[in-house]
Image: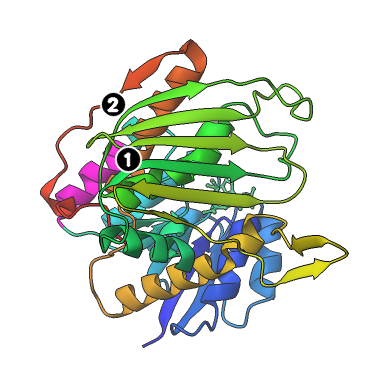
């Protein structure tokens, strides 16, 4: 069966996902697109063999031609689209963030619980990166004993002019927030954001940040968030356990030794580093939907939990100090621990 997908928001990542979904190996094609910029929607539809540009996201969700929906519009627009998909009984893959406030995320969780079936998946793509999966396998398999400490770094070469101080948490560190809950199978119990000496390259931004997370079982995590490192894009994670350590390996495809120097390429940006993760993420989503199974990947609950932690981190960034986090009870629909 071919899955007929509609895509709402055909900007940068929307077009990337369309490339994977239209005629991809999972058996899907893009039959409709919609964008607040009608001209952009028409241009994108014109490049596809079976897609129509529709006047609005709501029309796309209601269309009988669309089996499943991908939401890749701006974050503040996600909530109404995801709620409309739940009401229409259509599976929806929504890029992160699920919504931009925890109340909005909670409304989505409540609507999905009322519907009684998981159909919302959030685009936390780290869970599909082969290196991150191998890291989790090593931790879960007991290769390093019980985890005690985790050291992470999230470094961007640069960020666009509209990037604000809060985006270091809400847009950037939110990937680590989901990754840590998934990797360690624990909720985050507290967070404290430290503001070291500012990089002279960051303008008005408070860059870098050092974010300390306390997991529910006591594991302590430090995350460096740097968004102006100039040299490239780098994601690091090392887990220190009772009997060993495991870390993400260098991603350079080759290492050159020459003139007394060892050198390897650093990815330019997140697209280069995580291409494979997006391929796997969407292929598994299509496979699940085609098989008629409830969605398995990062859930609406994961989107909600990440937003609660992100808000707590922003509170610490603005007012200082350690902020405790308490989530309400997890609804039975999401009974399993964070999993991919
Ligand atoms: N998982 C990841 O690694 C990752 C990477 C990049 C972006 N994202 C997320 O994807 C989303 C889109 O990011 P982007 O970088 O592609 O942004 P973008 O600005 O390039 O594209 C967004 C598109 O949405 C359209 N749009 C805005 N409001 C709309 C509405 N109400 N209805 C329909 N279309 C609307 C815009 O016109 C634009 O074409 C964001 O939520 C972002 O956080 C995730």
Q: Position of residue 142 (x, y in %)?
A: 26, 60
- Quickly name the residue at label 2: 325
Establish if 25 lies above or below 72.
below
Q: Secondary structure at mark 2?
A: loop
**Mark nearer the N terminus (2 vs 1):** 1
CA gap, disc 2 and disc 1 = 13 Å
Residue at image position (57%, 51%) is 235
Please tell me in which quadrant of the rendered image residue 63 appears.
bottom left
Please tell me in which quadrant of the rendered image residue 123 appears.
bottom left
Q: Position of residue 326 (x, y in %)?
A: 23, 27
Could you classify mark 2 by the number of other residues whose Cα lies within 10 Å: few (under 14), some (14-19), or many (20 or more)?
Answer: some
Q: Secondary structure at mark 1?
A: helix
- Quickly name the residue at label 1: 304
Main SS of the magenta part reads: helix
Q: Which residues are magenta?
A: 106-116
Residue at image position (66%, 63%) is 272
Q: Position of residue 178 (x, y in %)?
A: 39, 46
Q: Is residue 11 visible in this depiction of the protein?
A: no
Residue 115 counted in the magenta span: yes
> Which dot, 2 or 1, sits closer to the camera?
2
């Amino acid at each position: 069966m071919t899955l007929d997908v509609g895509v709402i928001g055909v900007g940068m990542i929307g077009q990337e996902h369309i490339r994977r979904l239209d005629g991809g190996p999972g058996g899907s094609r893009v039959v409709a697109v919609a964008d607040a910029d009608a001209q952009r929607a028409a241009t994108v539809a014109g490049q596809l063999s079976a897609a129509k540009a529709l006047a609005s996201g709501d029309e796309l969700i209601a269309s009988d031609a669309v089996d499943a929906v991908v939401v890749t519009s701006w974050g503040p627009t996600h909530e109404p689209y995801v709620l409309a998909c739940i009401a229409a009984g259509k599976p929806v893959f929504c890029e992160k963030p699920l919504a931009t406030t925890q109340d909005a995320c909670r409304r989505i969780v409540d609507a999905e619980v009322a519907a009684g079936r998981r159909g919302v998946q959030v685009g936390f793509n780290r869970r599909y990166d082969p290196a991150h999966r191998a890291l989790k396998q090593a931790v879960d398999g007991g290769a390093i004993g019980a985890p005690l400490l985790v050291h992470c770094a999230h470094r961007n070469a640069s960020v666009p002019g509209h990037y604000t101080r809060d985006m270091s948490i809400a847009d950037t560190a939110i990937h680590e927030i989901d990754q840590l809950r998934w990797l360690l199978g624990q909720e985050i119990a507290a967070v404290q954001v430290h503001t070291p000496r500012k990089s002279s390259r960051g303008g008005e931004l408070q860059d870098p940040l050092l974010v300390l997370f306390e997991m529910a079982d006591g594991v302590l995590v430090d995350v460096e968030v740097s968004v102006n490192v100039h040299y490239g894009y780098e994601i690091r994670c090392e887990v220190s356990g009772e009997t060993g350590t495991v870390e993400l390996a260098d991603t350079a495809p080759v290492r050159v030794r020459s003139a007394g120097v060892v050198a390897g390429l650093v990815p330019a940006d997140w697209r280069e580093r995580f291409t494979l993760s997006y391929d796997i993420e969407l292929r598994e989503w299509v496979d699940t939907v085609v098989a008629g199974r409830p969605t398995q990947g990062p859930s609406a609950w994961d989107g909600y939990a990440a937003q609660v932690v992100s808000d707590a981190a922003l509170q610490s960034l603005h007012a200082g100090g350690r902020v405790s986090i308490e989530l309400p009870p997890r609804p039975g629909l999401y009974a399993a621990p964070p999993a991919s």
